[in-house]
Amino acid sequence: MMSRTEEDFELELRSLPGVLNVGITKHANGDVNVVTLVANSKDPSATRGAATQIASLYYPEAAVVVEDANRAMADHSRGDGPRVALIRADYDTTDGFCEVQLSVDGRTGIGRAGSGPLIGGAEATLAALRDLGYDVPYSLMTVTNVTNGRDWPVIVTLRSLANDADRFGIARSEDDLISAVKATLDSLNRFLSTLEGRI
């Protein structure tokens, strides 16, 4: 749980122009170690400078990292994609529930969640991963729908339940639900690859 100081710190960072998401990583003793901003900024170095000034007031020892959301989208579009494959994702407008079906190594996992296509899509994806047997020690922190003028990428932030680094994923498709599912999988790509063969 965040302290009041951390909440104020995060709020100040989120108020910077172009900042879409903020992740805070802590040392084992609870001190803030790294602050990561995902930003859609024309000048990432200026964003980093402003964020570093804010961080110096709250956590002078913390490192500040700014990830360019536009570059992240380009990098992810060139990747091989997640090891876990999306089979289908449906949103029922009558009851507000999403259902996501994933597959890996011939096995299928299904997850359901309410809360609409964005939050519900991300939560249903986590549920489907757990149905596949993955122990996913992360909880959903934010799902942000962002416009860049042409389409609507979705950024998902997962908070570690073990004080590890937050995870960010980004994806873009013509459908909010599919974007939320793919962004959730994207945020967990490297984590899931470390579990290969252990489930």
Image (cartoon, grey):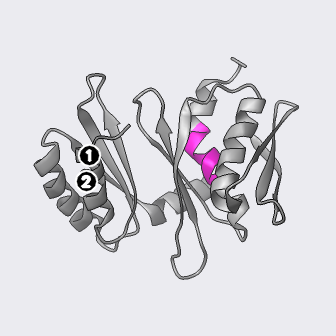
Q: Residues within 10 Å of mark 1 (few under 14, many from 20)?
A: few
Q: Is residue 44 visible?
A: yes
Q: How many numbered circles are shown?
A: 2
- Residue 19, by quadrant, is bottom left
Q: Is residue 156 magenta?
A: no
Closer to us: 13 or 153: 13
Q: Is residue 80 visible?
A: no
Provide the secondary structure element on which disc 1 rests: helix
In the rendered image, the residue lying farthest to the top is 198
Q: Position of residue 102 (x, y in %)?
A: 80, 42
Q: Position of residue 81 (x, y in %)?
A: 68, 47
Residue at mark 1: 4
Asked if residue 13 is positioned above or below residue 58 in the image, the reply reads below
Residue at mark 2: 8
Q: Give the residue type that dot 1 points to.
A: Arg
Provide the secondary structure element on which disc 2 rests: helix
Asked if residue 111 is positioned above or below residue 198 in the image, the reply reads below
Closer to us: 92 or 185: 92
Q: CA distance from mark 2 to mark 1?
A: 6 Å
Q: Residues within 10 Å of mark 2 (few under 14, many from 20)?
A: few
Q: Position of residue 179 (x, y in %)?
A: 67, 60
Asked whether the beta carbons under mark 2 and mark 1 sit within 8 Å of each other, the answer is yes
Residue at the spot x=78%, y=55% of the render? Answer: 97
Secondary structure mainly formed by the magenta segment: helix
Residue numbers of the magenta segment:
181-189
Q: Quadrant of the C terminus?
A: top right
- Residue 198, by quadrant, is top right
Q: Quadrant of the N terminus?
A: top left
Q: Is residue 181 left or right of residue 49?
A: right
Residue at the spot x=40%, y=29% of the render? Answer: 163
Residue at the spot x=49%, y=58% of the render? Answer: 72
Q: Is residue 173 left or right of residue 150?
A: right
